[in-house]
Image: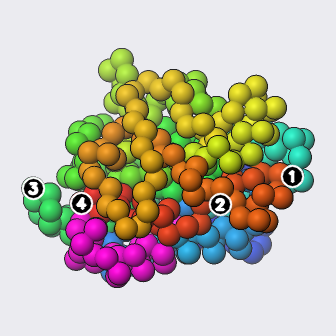
Amino acid sequence: MEVDLDERGRLLVPGTGTIVAANRVGEYLARNLRIPERATDIYVYVHGWQTAPGTASRTAARLVQQAQALRAAGRERYPGVARGFRPWVVVVRWPSSSVSTLGGFRRIRERAHAMSALGTGHAPFVLAHLLGYLDVHRAHPENPAVLTNRSGQYLHLVGHSFGGRFLCEAVQWATERPVQPRVLGWSTPVDPRRPFTVDSALIFQMAAPRDAFVRHFAALFPSGGAPGAPLRGPLVLTHSRWDRATGFWHLRAEGEPGIGHSGTGATPVPQSTIRMLTTRTAYARRALDHRIVNVDAGWLYRGGWKNKLSPSGAHSDFQHPESAHLLLTLASLSR
């Protein structure tokens, strides 16, 4: 399933360029999104810089296909999904193409900001409606008191580059009617005042300042009596020093490297840093059960010979089985 946005973040009718009026977004989603009953995990994927619409859809499909293959080949490493893993993906697509120069990077950075800006940008509004809709309509657990036997559907966020910004904004801005909190596998408690619960969030090579979770996304986490965003599971962010888009270009555009290059800096909550593992090694729950987890993927996200010649370096070099291993592990540990 694809959801298309224009340069202001407004929802478009696929293939027509027709804008869906803001007061009709909920109605449009209810009419056009149908969550398959057989799906166990719902993924919302938002792509990043220099990604064509078709490429975004293929990338998301490849990630979940790799995850399915890993589960089939080694189920003992993912006990939480032993009963089944049938993902369903919503791909959010937006105009992210530009020339691969500092000017091009700045242009898309400003576009991403404008699409999310308070009062003018529509992307968080549309995505918040999307997440609220998916939560309300996903299957509820039959026995919420039993942590290991949840029969409902799990909701996960996956972003790349600037797509991670959109997801963070959407989760912050969510204003849908609160629903009953879920019982999940993570240690972080659920706040009943929040509108929906996201079971995990994974952002590859985020294009944002290292202090973005203090400067831009502080509302994601509880503070001063505010409940924080409805993010139940960890926020996991990969980084690689071979990422020139969030290294070289980000440094020149914003005066410092970005999260995708160096990981997070100052954060309002404790953070953890781990190394990305191979598909042969299982992640321990204690390694991922934190509010923010930085994953150093520099040994893997290096870019092939083509990426070595690319101005963005390894920025988009996350399509590996090890990435799907991390994605599937998060799904498994959410149970």
Task: Evaluate whether residue 178 shows in this view.
Answer: no
| Residue in view at x 59 percent, y 31 percent | 210
- Distance in Å between CA atoms under marks 4 and 3: 12 Å
Q: Which residue is mark 3?
A: 145
Mark 4 lies on residue = 335
User: For the residue labelled by badge 2, is the local secondary structure a helix, a strand or a loop?
Assistant: loop
Residue 48: which quarter of the image? bottom right
Front residue of this view, candidates 121 and 292: 292
What's the residue type where badge 2 is placed? Answer: Asp
User: Mark 1: few, some, or many residues within 10 Å (few <14, many ≥20)?
Assistant: some
Q: Is residue 88 magenta?
A: yes
Q: Which residue is mark 2?
A: 317
Q: How far is mark 2 from mark 4, CA to CA?
A: 29 Å
Of pointers 2 and 1, the one earlier in the residue sequence: 1
Residue 286: percent from left, percent from top: 26, 45
Residue 71 is at least partly visible in this image: yes
